[in-house]
Image (spheres, rainbow, N blue to C red):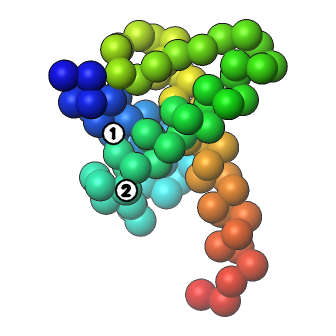
Amino acid sequence: MGWIIALIVGGVAGWLASLLMNRDSSMGLFMNIVVGCIGSVVGNLIAGPLLGISGSVQEFSLTGLVIAVVGAVVLLAIVNLIQRGRVR
């Protein structure tokens, strides 16, 4: 059951991050879930050592959702930096 919650929270976190970073039109549902789940891992890597906060998307909590959104925003910012160098 934990992986279903992780997919749902990851999808919401990825969707919120894509709205914040103005990338919602270029991402689909699957990419929102992927970005949200990877963003949760990135967020926990950042928030754990710096702030002493940890959250998990396997059981729903507001802290876990916020950390996942922040991590997904960081991930999308890195992707934007990489894509900006490319010729489109």
Reply above or below: 22 against 2. Answer: below
- Where, quadrant-wise, is the N terminus in this rendering? top left
Mark 2 secondary-structure assignment: helix
Tag 1–tag 2 contact (CB < 8 Å):
no
Query: Would residue 49 be visible to someone looking at this image?
Result: yes
Q: Give the image quarter of residue 54.
A: top right
Quadrant position of the C terminus in the picture: bottom right
The percent coordinates of residue 75 (x first, y second) are: 61, 49
Q: Which residue is mark 1?
A: 11
Q: Residue at x 35, y 14 (%)?
A: 60
Distance from Cα at disc 1 to Cα at disc 2: 8 Å
Can residue 71 be seen here? no
Q: Residue at x 28, y 52 (%)?
A: 29
Q: Please indicate whether residue 51 sits to the left or right of residue 61 in the image.
A: right
Position of residue 44 measured from the top left corner of the image (x, y, whole percent):
62, 26
In the rendered image, which quarter is residue 45 located in? top right
Q: Residues within 10 Å of mark 2 (few under 14, many from 20)?
A: some
Image position of 22 with respect to 49: above or below = below
Residue at the spot x=50%, y=43% of the render? 38
Mark 2 — residue?
Answer: 31
- Taking depth in this image into account, of 35 and 24 the one nearest to the observer is 35
The amino acid marked with disc number 1 is Gly
Q: Amino acid at mark 2?
A: Met
- Residue at image coords 38%, 35%: 10
Mark 1 lies on a secondary structure that is: helix
Which circle's residue, 1 or 2, is located before the other in the chain? 1
